[in-house]
Amino acid sequence: MSSEASGSPGRRQTNVRLSPSQLVRPRVRRVAEADIRIDDGYVCVTLHVPEVEDSELRYSIRRRYLMVWGESAHREQHLVHLPRAVDPEQHNVRFQNGVVDARIKLKAP
C-alpha cells in the first residue's frame, strides 16, 4: 500500500532521520483528539483539522506518531499517539474538507 491523498501527490515528508520536533517548528504543538481503532491488522485514525486547507495538508508517520500540519502556516502541528507500533511504509491517508482518514498497517509482532 502506498500513500494516497486527494489532490496533488507528494504530501508525505520523507526526511526519516529527523525527530518529530525537527520536522516542523510550529508555534503550537498539541496532542490531537482523534478517533482511533484497530481493524483487521491496521490502525485507523480519523482526525478533524478544519484550519488546514486540503491542498496544504502535510503528514508524517514516525514510530508511534501520526503528525499532521498545514504547509503554508506552520503554526500548529497535530500529534496523534498510535496505540501500537506501525509500518510507516504501508499506509493510506485521505484528506477532504478538514478531515484526515488514515489507515496504517500494524507491525508484525
Image (spheres, rainbow, N blue to C red):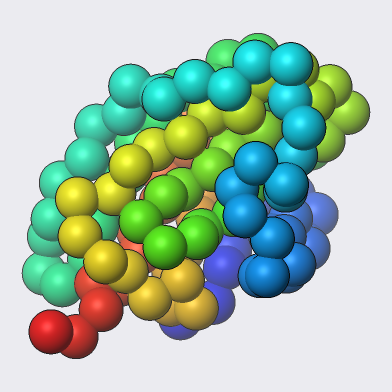
Q: Say whether residue 41 is left or right of residue 31.
A: left
> How many numbered marks have been drawn onto this rendered protein structure?
0
- Left or right placement of residue 43 versus residue 55 in this view: left
**Rendered position, 85 above or below 82:** below
The front one of 66 and 8 is: 66
Whether residue 5 is visible to the viewer of this picture, yes or no, is: no
What x and y, as percent, mark residue 56?
Answer: 79, 35
Could you say where residue 89 lies in the image, as x and y percent from the top left? 50, 78
Residue shown at the point (58%, 63%) measured from the top left = 4
Quadrant showing the C terminus: bottom left
Residue occupying the point 24% across, 32% down:
35
Q: Is residue 34 visible?
A: yes
Residue sitting at the far right: 72
**Quarter residue 75 falls in:** top right
Residue 31 horizontal/vertical position (percent): 41, 25
Residue 24 vs residue 33, the one in the foreground: 24
Q: What residue sits 58% from the left and 22% below the top?
A: 29
Locate residue 85: give its quadrant.
bottom left
**Residue lying farthest bottom?**
108
Residue 43 image offset from top left, x and y in percent:
24, 57
In the rendered image, the vertical position of residue 53 relative to residue 41, given as above or below: above
Q: Is residue 91 above or below residue 35?
A: below
Closer to the camera in the image, 35 or 65: 65
The residue positioned 74% from the left and 16% from the top of the image is 27
